[in-house]
Amino acid sequence: MFSTITAAPAKQSVGETISVLSGRLSTATLLEDRRAAILGLRSFAKQYPASVASGALRSLIGTLSRDGEDVDTVKVVMETLLMLFSPDENSPEASEEIALWLADEFTQRQENITLLLDFLETNEFYSRLYSLQLLSAILAARTERTEECILVAPMGIPRLVAVLDDVREAVRDEGISLLTDLTPASIDIQKLVAFEKGFERVFDIIRQEGGLIEGARVVENCLILLANLLRLNSSNQSMFREMGFIAKLGRLLKDSYRPAEDGQEIAPWAQEQRNRNIYALLAVIRLFLASRAIGTPQNQLAFLKDHCLENTLELAFTDYIEPLIRSEALITCADMIRGNPTLQQIFAGLQVPAPPGNQATDKDACTNGVSRQYTIDALLEIILAVNGPQRFDMRMAACMCLKAYFFNHPEAQRFFLDRAIAGHKQNPGEPTNVLTTLLYPLPDAMATDPYRYWFSSVLMLHLIHESPATKELAMAVTEGDEASGEEVVTSIQTIAAHLLSCVNKSEDARIIIGYLMLLLCWLFEDLGAVNDFLDEFTNLQGLIQAAVENPNGDVIVQGLSTMLTGVIYEFSTKDSPVPRAAVQNIIMTRMGRDRYVDKLSKLRAYPLMRDHEVLSENIGPGPDGGLPDVFLDDTFVDFFKDNYSRILRAIDRDPGFEISVITNGVQKGVSRELVDSLRAQVEEKEQKLRDLDVEKSSLTSQLGQEQADHRHTKDNTLKDNHAKEVARLNQAMEALRAQFNSKERALQDAEKKLASVTKSLSQEQADHQRTRTEIVRLKSINDGLQRNHEQEVTKIQREHSLKEEQLRKAAESDAERVRRRSEAEKADLKATISRLEVDLMKANKAKSVNEEKTSELENKIKVATESLGDTEKRLKASEDAVRKATKQLQDKEEEHQSTQKELEDLLDVFTDLEEKVSKYKVSSLFQPFCLVFYTKNEKQKQLKALGEAVSDGEEDDGDEEEDGDE
């Protein structure tokens, strides 16, 4: 009759729903209710991370602690937290501050980080995986604080390292990623990871993944982790070296250039990953070879010992390897030998595979059918005979290898230069000769390959830089036969002529810069080289013109030309082909001081010079795939910056003041005016010296006359004063005698005191000696007592161990006796069962008398058999107890008594059973049964008569049967 209209419930907003779910999560007592609330919050976490985090973050973390044993709840909570760290980008609440807020909530309480680490102890897949991902997200947001929390947490680092042993790839890879993010900056964490067998685990993963060739991204991540553990950490590097892991690096290198066994082509993505793996391995090796590091020499020798140098060279000269990898391998070789004379010498004697287009014809140069050549020749071919922007990295790396070979090794520099000079004289057309390339440039090659001449200049620069011996050797190279009337041209003049020719023809700036760098290092602090350059007057004029009127307007060319003019003026002399004053006059006239300073200042501020250390690390092709922007050498940049201020101020120095230079221990260069003034002063001093000699002669004659007059006067006055003098001397003698007597008495008193002191000292020494003797005696007594004490302790220990052995043997013998007794009782029970079975069989023969009673007897016997089975089980239990008694000596007697009592009870039970069976037989069976038992009794008597053993039970049964018969 009444109709009810139900209104739709009010629609809740998202904020209200999240608040309700948060309240339910914090107040619910049932696990299912809390899990349902978490599932609801998870559905909002992606779109509304701020609302969920503000209302339920602490409850979610608390649920991890409260319900940590429930796998499903932990999984849902961690998924929700991960969603909060990475919300939807289109969410209105998405913000980077949420991740910081979440990370602060975890890191401000140490137990929260410890809680996440505790989940790594479980074997559940999602618990381990999600806890690692949460730690990674927290670490990304608050790096330093997270590192501190993990470092302080109990077993924090060992738990993370143990994840690397997980057989599930997802968990293991996540552990590698977390350790990689955790180890770049903290030296303490690096040491702890290494101490927890981090190196071994990383190499095991690389081996399981197939090494560098077959390994996927996880191999690259392992190598990055290895690099983090070794970077700037000398202790980890020493541990790595001492534990023999460098040999594993050598084996990985050897496998890296091994061709595919099946000959099939590798997929592009697999080839790219292979290259990344090899590149990462070479980067790890270079960490051991940091310049001027303390452990670098030891690391270099270790790499040589484990064949890393040879394998790296083989990788660099394997033709099918990518050029970028080969370049990195050559740079690694350069780091391996730099500054180590032993390795530099061995490096020059190694052989590498020859390029396909340059097969050796010498049989000795072939190994396993592969043509080989010496390393230095192969590097020169890469530098001077290879063209193209794509190969520039390889040429640059090969040049670095040769520079490392020259570094701080004068013998190597001289040997290389001698070979270059000999090859230049014997074969002027050799394309891989550095000296020939500089002295005989080819116009076509200048246009197509300017870096050929740049590299030649750089190598020559490193041969002569700060080496007077190689400078003189290079200066001795000349062109032209003076005996035939030809003009003799030195190497410096030839290079200067090619420089000016390139400037006039507007050749590539790289060629001009290469020549300028070479001449600057050659002429610096070398007066002979400067004079050789000035022998041709036009060289100076052309150089100033290149600095001032360069049509290309290149800042580097103008600046280096200006610096070269400054070097020429700085080290020129009054005796130079163009005198020092004339050189200054030409510079001031054609350039001027202001322009001179401006050119040098612009070069110093030019980005390629100012930021060379940064820009040289990012070498790449030029615009539109052209030549790269590489103009300056590292060593030259250091030379320029070190001497910039000196050359800048050189123009202000007076021409009359020549720079003093010490070359090979000989000082060169002085001021001419100073020499003239010193010469005039010497002549003046000599004239004064002659005048003084004449004056000395006159004074000597006057002195002789004065001495003769003095002797005559002295003889006349000596006689008058003699008597007075004798009287005065007598008085003085008496006074001295009295003084002597007083001092003699004082000396005697002192001797007496000395004698008494000596006597007391002797007595004290005797007492001291007696004391030392007593100490030695007491010490010997103490040593004897101590030895006796030790012997007594040893004796007591021996007796104690003997008693323990005796007790152990006694316990074993008791246990063995109990076991034997149990076995005997078990055998008796089995014999009883056998006897009952025999009786049953005999009874079956007479079953025609009373089959029903026989069946009842069989049932009772079956019950007795089952009871016997139970008894056997209890016997086995008693045997186990006996075995335990051998281990527990104190409880041996109690267990033995209980077992014995139990066996006696069992025997009583069986005795009762046998009595009941016997009575039943007597009362129930007829005459055939009596005959059977009578026959059995007679058999027992016969057995006894024959001497056979009969058990007590059988005898009792026999007696009972006899009674039944009566």
Image (tube, grey):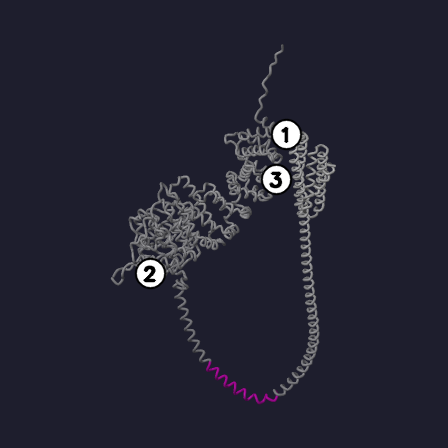
Q: Between residues 200 and 885, which one lies in front from this camera angle?
A: 885
Residue 321 image offset from top left, x and y in percent: 39, 45
Which mark identifies residue 111?
Answer: 3
Work out whether mark 1 precedes mark 3 in sequence or the reverse, and give the earlier one. Answer: 1
Point out the image quarter for the C terminus.
top right
Residue at the spot x=55%, y=35% of the render? 126
Work out whether mark 2 precedes mark 3 in sequence or the reverse, and give the earlier one. Answer: 3
Residue 805 image offset from top left, x and y in percent: 67, 53
Q: Which residue is mark 1?
A: 30
Q: Using residue 901 as the reference point, say whether residue 17 is left or right of it.
A: left
Which segment is the magenta one?
700-724
Amino acid type, mark 3: Glu
Amino acid type, mark 1: Leu
Classify 251 as above or below 121. Answer: below
Residue 350 image offset from top left, x and y in percent: 39, 54
Amino acid type, mark 2: Ala
Element assignment for label 2:
loop
Badge nearest the viewer, 2 or 1? 1
